[in-house]
Amino acid sequence: MRQQNLLMPTLREIPSDAEAASHRLMLRAGLIRPLAAGVYTYLPLGRRVLRKAEAIVREEMDRIGAQEVLLPAMQPAELWRESGRYDVYGPELVRLRDRHDREFALGPTHEEVVTALVRDEISSYRKLPLTVYQIQTKFRDERRPRYGLLRGREFLMKDAYSFDTDWEGLDATYRAMYEAYHRIFTRCGLNYRAVEADAGAIGGEGETHEFMALAEIGEDTVVACGSCGYAANLEKAEAAAAQQAQAAADGEAAPPLERWHTPDIRTIVQLTELLGPEASRLMKALLYLADGKPVAVMVRGVDEVSEVKVQRYLGADQLELADADTVQSVTGAPVGFAGPVGLNVPLLVDREVSALGKGIAGANERDYHYRHVRPGRDFSLAHTGYFREVRLGDRCARCDEPLTLHRGIEVGHVFKLDTKYSTALGAKATSISGTKQDIIMGCYGIGVSRLLSAVLEQHHDEQGIVWPLSLAPFHVHIVPVAVTDDAQRELAEELYGRLQAQGVEVLLDDREERPGVKFKDADLIGLPVRIVVGKRAGERVVEYKERQAPEAEQITVEEAVKRVLELVRPAASRDAK
């Protein structure tokens, strides 16, 4: 490609609204341009990278026997009502009506559509197992689109769906997909972790893993153990018990409840400052509305409630923190004084609270708390579980080594769905014994456009992008210092032709620009190899530099061609394996 003709409008200034490094770089390097909040146009460089990511995904999906389809983006609302997700999905579901007043939704995902397809086309175990996939634009009306392609309202996604007759079949399909994801993200040059996860709005009761690209800008937290390899999303992670039989140490004869006057002290921070060392015994009660009904959750003062764990325990479709009026109505006190004693709503008690021999909690009365609150004596432990978030300092539940916390970008997710959708939509197949049974499903997603942002968060420096060879829009950037110089222009054209003839993707900077502009653009777009044709063109000597190398080298044209082929061909061969 000749750069003079390439639609690649680079920017010198950093866009003020671009918070993430990947967003800034994609805008500055001319990969994307915004059309509306969370909606982007892909310019030629961005589209080339996207196509390479798609190709890697396709190769690995085809390798495990998945078949590519293309499902409609516009989906009848009645399908979503059949599955029970039309109301559950919330305002992120883009809804519309056609001229006949029929309701539709723009697909954020395709479980309903693909299940209906299989329901109508497959009726016997003889046609199973089956895995289909597509790479298609998805739509989600994000409340706050941000970070460029990391959280957009229109994005490219690979979604795959498997259909099996039994759990053994699903296990085999899941494992094949899990391993394919490892190959995909490794080929894309990502530093990532596969972590245990929560199924979220997709649902299903089986195993699920997220693939997280480690990056500081990530909106998710990965909890990991460097000793045994345990890794989980913060929403799913659990740590070893922190309390060491404290209840037994305190003895069975805990003092009776003591009403304690605490005027205007309603926050954990204020109580901690007041109590000093005794603050380790603080308990806090938080009021929530689960599908509109009030519930209370008890955790230690140092901990945070994991709303995902609470919602999953309750089986609730929606969970939100109760407002001040609800807190007043349930507890009889304003926010800041809620406690477990005497509450007449379901009380979920984190296991660390249940292990406290005695503690301090709100008294459900303005300006008062209780001392010597004893779990099991003063409030019920009927609903005890793991309802807190793991925090720094916790230890691994498997090996008792310290856990570490990292920020991560979710780039892929694999689910065992069980029969959630096949039961709801009536997708059944006749078994070998002749009985009809619900088909067992799995689903597997990769955010293909998000993948680009994740890669750039990990692959850049102060000058610009540092593309992995597998995703680079071109392999080589040829930069003649002065295109008006006959020797430079002719040698650059020769190199351009020779490398293209060998299947190398080459960008030739044939613009009549100052050398400084050309070099800055070359560093910004970050192709794996830059070959500068300068004053030594008459000697057939060029400057060769790989993007990650600290220094450039002066080598012959023949040596430059040899090095490029050695770099590109082995990489292509590795990817094909």
Image (cartoon, grey):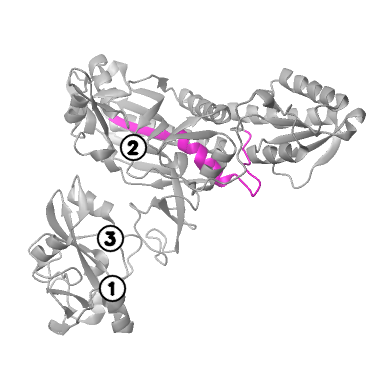
**The magenta stretch spans which residues?**
441-469
Residue type at numbered disc 1:
Ile
In this figure, which residue is indicated by the disc labeled 3?
305
Task: Give how far across and how far down residue 371 sits, in percent.
Answer: 18, 81
Residue type at numbered disc 3:
Val
Q: State the SS at label 1.
A: helix
Q: Earlier in the sequence, mark 1 or mark 2?
A: 1
On screen, residue 79 above or below 367: above
On screen, residue 461 above or below 98: below
Q: State the SS at label 2.
A: strand
The residue at the point 70 percent across, 41 percent down is 520
Residue 169 as seen in the image, left or right of residue 334: right
Residue 24 as seen in the image, left or right of residue 243: right
Q: State the SS at label 3.
A: loop
In this figure, which residue is indicated by the disc labeled 1?
268
In this figure, which residue is indicated by the disc labeled 2?
415
Q: Quadrant of the rendered structure where residue 170 is? A: top left
Q: Separation of disc 1 and disc 2 at Cα?
A: 38 Å
Q: Quadrant of the rendered structure where residue 356 is? A: bottom left
Image quadrant where one finds the C terminus: top right
Q: Is residue 505 visible?
A: no
Query: How crowded is the residue under tag 2: few (<14 C-alpha within 10 Å), some, or many (20+)?
Result: many
Q: Nearer the viewer, residue 137 or 102?
A: 102
Q: Separation of disc 2 and disc 3 at Cα?
A: 25 Å
Residue type at numbered disc 2:
Phe
Q: Earlier in the sequence, mark 2 or mark 3?
A: 3
Q: Nearer the viewer, residue 317 or 227?
A: 317
The residue at the point 17 percent across, 28 percent down is 82
